[in-house]
Structures are given as structure tokens and as C-alpha cells.
Image (spheres, rainbow, N blue to C red):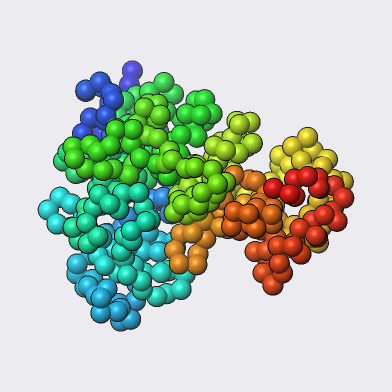
Amino acid sequence: MVSRLSLAAGLLLLTVPLLAQEPHGTAAGLVKYVGSQACQLCHYKIYERWKKTPMANVVRDPREHSDAVLGDFSTMNAEEKFSKDDIAFVYGNVWKQLYFKKVGNDYFVLPGEWDIAHRVWHPYVARPGTEWWVPYYSPDSMKRPTGPLCDGCHAVNYDIHTRTVTEWNVGCERCHGPGSAHVKAPSRSNIVNPARIGAVSANDVCVQCHARGLPVSNPIDNLYYNWPVGYHVGLNLQDFWKFAEHKLGETSFAFYADGTGHVNRAQGNDFVQSAMYSHGVRCWSCHDVHGTDNESNLLKPTSVMCFECHGPNSPNGPRANTIEEHTHHKAGSPGSECVECHMPKIERTTVDVYVRSHTFRFITPTMTEQYQIPNPCNQCHADKTTQWATAALERWDEQSPWRLKF
């Protein structure tokens, strides 16, 4: 007897357009991408939460979403001038917004970037000495298609040959793999649940797009790609992707001298260096990409969540009788927030807007002096010197004086 669930899933397969090609690395005809709407029937509550997240709204069509365009076109500079009619997609909704024009099957970034935080326009340019791919492409963004550099991470199943996608945005199958078999006959055995795979592969689900790197084979068909072409969840990311090179002691566009990310989208590069990663912590130990009401889709506010693993005299630290004894700041003050010291906002995303580092290391004032890596003490106490900050830390009895010297 056919169950109601199986029948509904089968009917849904017939109604969801199969826009995708066969996923790379799978046997032809076995599984296909079907789009996130195919998940809605059985996973309605999760789907509704996800639809409100930045993941689900990175790429938006202003013809479908009247509120998609955030930029104030009455304040545009002459060199950034373009019309709303040129916009096929908007890209971004948190820190900045770019505008894409469609030409044939390709998309190109229009010359103005809207700074959401400051409500001003900036020219959109790829400056020499920044991204690794700059030497391989035209400085003119209207001659530089987004497919090789952007679209593979901001869509599901981007096909580099046809330049088509199953769906725009970070949909369900970006993290769970192609879902046609699962929709047809729902089972744990025919879909990837990152919570049920090894820690390295599980974190790679996020690392695939949240890490600075380049494909193992590059160029591909004479184009240089900035995302792991051919990878999908269930495969080994290392077969498709390698981290950007960094030499300790040198500061680059992407990294500080110690290897901490210098710019956004280096969370994966940071995280794999951390004690958290080596002890099996996973990205969703802290974040729920299906959506929460907390900043950055955190499971709980940081003032609550950190203490679920860390607390006074915990084996995981801090090794003090109270949090105040550890932080030397009043309870409830910014200085007693774990993330302010262990995840400072030092990774640039646009102009003067920064996101948090994910190494969880405490950066000492001495490291600022020696390597110009911003430290959290002087970020808050901006009117003080690094020498003042070091002297203050030396008076903290439970702190090792040796660790403050490097």
C-alpha cells in the first residue's frame, strides 16, 4: 500500500520543475537536484524559518520582490550611474548590496555598490593586490562574469557549461545534497544529514563557501574559479578545493600575519586552526542556518551559549572562580562578553564594517606591536596604548605572564 507521505512526495516531484543537470560526481540518472520547494511539504517549519534567513535571500529578483533594492538611486555618483531597469538581481542584504545585469546566460556586476550600514554608494572595482583572481580578469566588472567568481556559492547546482542553476540562494540541497531520491522515498539513507557524518566532512559543508581558497584544478576550461567546482555534499571537499596559501609572519589581503582572516569569508580558514575544531565542535554547535531570532543565526545569544560549554573552573575554561575574575570586567558589560575578547570584529567586509574572527584565540597587545594584528583590549580602549594594555594584563593574577609576550 502506498503511504500518503510517499504519494504526496511523488506528486510533488511531478510539480517541481527539474531545472538542474546531473550533479557532478554522481552516477547519471540516480539523483537530481529538485529545489528547496520540494522540501517544504515534509519540512514545513524548517522551510519557513529558512526562507527568512540571509542564506535564502542573498540573491533576489526585484521584479519578484519589490523591497529587494535597498540603494538610494537619488544619491548615486556619476561614475556609478545605472538604472534600476538594468538590475536582474540584487546580491546581498546585510552589509552591502551589489547589482547584477544579465547579458545572455551570464551576469555582470554593475559599477555601484550600496553600503547598507552607512547608506552611501561606493564604486565597485576589483583593485590590484586584493583578491587572488584579479590578474586573470578584466578590471571592468561588465567584462567579468559572476559565474566563475560568485554564483557557485550563491546558488544550488551552478552548471559551469550551461551557466544555469537549480535555484538561486543557499538552498536545502546546498547542505544536504541532491534530493530527488529522498523526495520520492523519504529515508535517512538517501539524503545527507551533516549532523550524522564525521566532524571534518560536516564542517566542510560550511567550509566549502566560508573559506578563502581556490579549486584544486584551476583554470577550468580557461576560466579561473573562486569556488569548489564539482563538489557537492557527500563528496570529499579536499578533492575539489584547497585553502589559499599563507606564509606565517606576512600580512596579505586575506590574512593577518598569524593566519587569522583579514577579510570576510575566512571563517573556515580561522576555524580549522582552533581548539574548538580539533575537539569536534561543528559550525552548527553555535549556528542554525535554518534560522533563529538571534544575531548571525546563533542558537542562543552569546551571553548564554558560550557558558553551555565554558564556565567558572570548567575543564574547558575559564579557570577562575567567577566570570568576573576571568574577565576583570563587570558582569553584563561588553568586557565580560566572551566574543569580545575571543572573537573580535577584525575581519573587514566593507569600508569600516568588520565581522568576528573564528580562531577563538586571544590576540595579545604584543601581537599588535609585532604583527599589526588588532587586539581586543585596544579595540575597546582605543584611547590607550598597547603598553598600557599589556601592563593591565600583567596585573591579572590568573593570566600566564609568558603568554603575554607573544
Query: For the N terminus, which image quadrant?
Result: top left
Q: Residue furthest bottom?
A: 74
**Image position of 64 (left or right of 371):** left
Of 360 and 159, which appears nearest the observer? 360
Q: Residue at x 12, y 53 (%)?
A: 104
Q: Residue furthest top?
A: 1
Name above or below for residue 344 compared with residue 290: below
User: Which quadrant of the structure image shows residue 191?
Assistant: top left
Q: Is residue 18 visible?
A: no
Q: Provide residue 138's location: percent of width, then percent of height.
A: 22, 56
Q: Quadrant of residue 231?
A: top left
Horizontal and vertical percent position of residue 181:
31, 25
* Camera sees residue 306: yes
Instruction: Classify residue 113 as left or right of residue 257.
Output: left
The correct choice, above or below, for 81 with respect to 109 in the image is below
Res 113 quadrant in image = bottom left
Name which residue lies at 57% across and 38% down: 273
Q: What residue do we see at 47% from left, 70% from top?
A: 117
Tell whether 317 sits left or right of 289: right
Q: Residue furthest left?
A: 104
Residue 153: x and y, percent? Answer: 34, 45
Left or right relative to 388: residue 23: left
> Looking at the image, is 45 positioned above or below residue 144?
above
Q: How many numbered dots are placed on residues in this image?
A: 0
Residue placed at 50% from the left, 67% from the top?
A: 352
Horizontal and vertical percent position of residue 168: 30, 48
